[in-house]
Image (tube, rainbow, N blue to C red):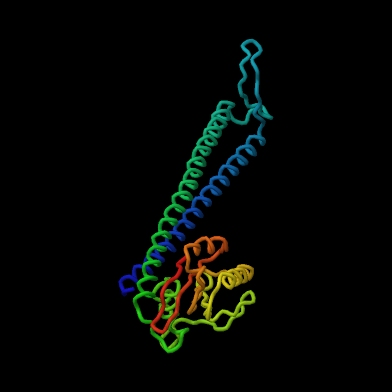
Amino acid sequence: MSKDDRSLAGKLDAAIENLSIWYRVTLVMVIIGLLSLSVVISLSQFTFQEEIHKHGEIKEIKDEESGLVGLAFVPDTEQVFSAESILKLYTTQVWLMASNGVVIGLLSFLFLWITARGQSYKKELKSIESQLIRQSYLVNFETSLPEGETKVDKILNHSSLVFPELQAIMSKAKPGEKKLPYKQNQSVGGETMDVVVSTKKGYFAVKFFDSVSKQTLEQFANNLSKSGKPFFRVLCISKNFDDELQSAHLGTILQNLELKFDMDLIFEDDQGYSMLWIN
């Protein structure tokens, strides 16, 4: 992948992250608005009722002749302030409550709209990112010679050209530091992982095999799933995959694993790598 392509992958990943931040901030603002409005309504209602009860009370009075029911303020003393003023205040309070109800409805609609649209946009961006990663995966692993002295260096150098998560770590490295910090020979769920890199989206892990059969792959995937570790990508690299894994049934086999993380199968030879499966 060229420098511009890597920049595009990084920018796309940043755009997804920014969208998530904007989405969360907007939701927080809506929630704060709803809470503030609720507090204002509660305080105004409390203050109004408290003031009313200081001087009297509002009662419903029924006209026996017409059967109509009206409101009247019954003061505790002969003169406080006019009953008409109290009734106007009460009517204003009713309209305030109704208006606040409309505002709450609008804010609730905004909350639901932001939730739906935000998730839709995020899903679309993730789809674009996945396509870009898939294309860069094929370009780098199928056409480029790996750089590095060891097989670990080679696979990490190649992978850092594909995944924005690894690029983000490299971009923050200080001069003189190892650009991509990783751990080797880490035991996870009974499996010894050759490479484990901690990223903001989970662990990026690599396992080298001499040969992989269907049973080997199923056991490996099952052990990692049971470990409960938050993997975002696992690379299974081998010089040989059995015939069943190279058949048209491979997609069904991997689907039946019900993995909660992405797992790729990669051929390794003296010249470099080639893709068997990109999840």
Displayed quadrant of residue 220: bottom right
Q: Is residue 277 left or right of residue 231?
A: left
Residue 104 visible from this viewpoint: yes
Q: Closer to the camera, 63 or 26?
A: 26
Q: Closer to the camera, 82 or 29?
A: 29
Q: Is residue 28 above or below residue 96?
A: below
Residue 173 visible from this viewpoint: no
Q: How many marks?
A: 0
Q: Kindly give the residue lying farthest to the top in the view shown.
A: 65
Q: Where residue 245 sits: x, y (%)?
A: 51, 68
Q: Where residue 222 sits: x, y (%)?
A: 61, 68
Q: Where residue 197 sits: x, y (%)?
A: 51, 77
Where's the N terminus, which quadrant?
bottom left
Displayed quadrant of residue 227: bottom right
Who's the residue at 51% across and 73% down the image? 242
Q: Where residue 129 sits: x, y (%)?
A: 40, 63
Q: Is residue 101 above or below residue 247?
A: above
Q: Is residue 80 above or below residue 204?
A: above
Q: Closer to the camera, 271 or 116?
A: 271
Who's the residue at 63% across and 38% down the image? 51
Q: Closer to the camera, 252 or 116?
A: 252
